[in-house]
Amino acid sequence: MKKIKGKMQQLYAININYGCYLALLEGISAVLGQRSRLGKYFFYRKHEAAKQYLRKKYKAIIDKYREEEYCESVVDFNRIWFFWWQGEQSMPEVVKLCYQSLHNYYDQSNIFLITQENIHNYIDIPDSILKKVNNRNFTLTIFSDYIRLSLLSKYGGIWLDSTILLTNVLNEDDNAYFFSINYGNPAMAYHVCMGKWMTSLIGVGKNTGIEFCQELFEVYFLTESTHLTYLLLDCVLALAYEIFPSFKESIDRVKIENTQVGRLDQLLKGSSDRELSTILEVQSIHKLSYKSIYNKRDYEYLKRIVERSNE
């Protein structure tokens, strides 16, 4: 009942702020899900409508960056951003394990833990944006997307979500201007990311695409009163992909690997140790969830993975 009430409030807010068409698409998509062909169609349509809204509303920003397109530097794989707003001491167990796994492969000097206590050491956040987050106009999840873009556009490097578990170093490409998970799966063409990136893991150098995304996101936060869609970051990245040829090229060059990034999370729920070991042989990046219900056995297995990697 609580989820239904929350969804109804979201649809009402979308209707008031963005119109009944976007609210209708959001509602239909929520009911159908993404499993059926019809569900995929409405999932695709709602994000196309969201992108169209952004194109029209923020045309001035698009035109500004079209005139100064550039791709200046490659991804810095020695600058890792890890975000937990409440701080290290408040991390849930699964987030602690993911953070520990990161230290197995990278020096402390290369890892930047971002919290509400130190964020202002890295970026300036307008007070009006913080006020909207505190008033719950925007969720902490959407706010973390704003922080992600702000850090990446200013410093470059790699953003790892707090529930990414590593079982090896990231596969560095000295010539990469963009880094993420490229699924290489035509069946994902309906998705707003088209299977070409995963926002949980993004690396960039200095380029027009990421600076455009950051400015659009910031102006969006300053002018809007609620979020348009949960996958707003994907929509903004998709716009940059469509608008800037150099950004599109850098994304298209990402190697197809680690495509089973969510498989370990699925297997933890009742699979044998042999099945779990098999995925570790072919996958070094694993997307977990602090909302998943892991039992004691699952946590013990994850701890063994992290401890073994540290040997």
Image (tube, grey):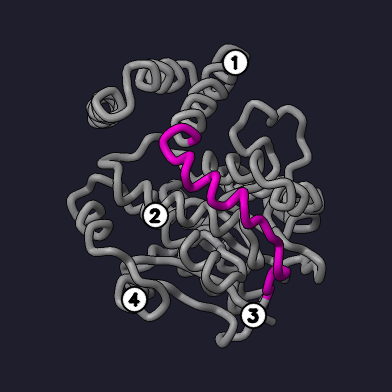
Circles 4 and 1: CB distance less than 8 Å?
no
95 or 123: nearer the viewer: 123
Which callout, 4 or 3, points to the residue nearer the camera?
A: 4
Amino acid on which disc 3 is placed? Tyr
Q: Is residue 198 above or below residue 68?
A: above
Residue at 62% in and 52% down = 67
Q: Which mark is residue 105?
A: none
Q: Which residue is mark 4?
A: 120
Q: Which mark is residue 106?
A: 3
Q: Is residue 145 above or below residue 63?
A: below
Amino acid on which disc 2 is placed: Glu
**Labels 4 & 3 near each other (Cβ < 8 A):** no
* In the image: residue 269, left or right of residue 273: left
x and y percentages locating residue 89 in the rendered image: 34, 75
The answer to which of marks 4 and 1 sits earlier in the sequence is: 1
Residue range highlighted in magenta: 55-77
Q: Where in the figure is residue 189, as x and y percent of width and height? A: 69, 29
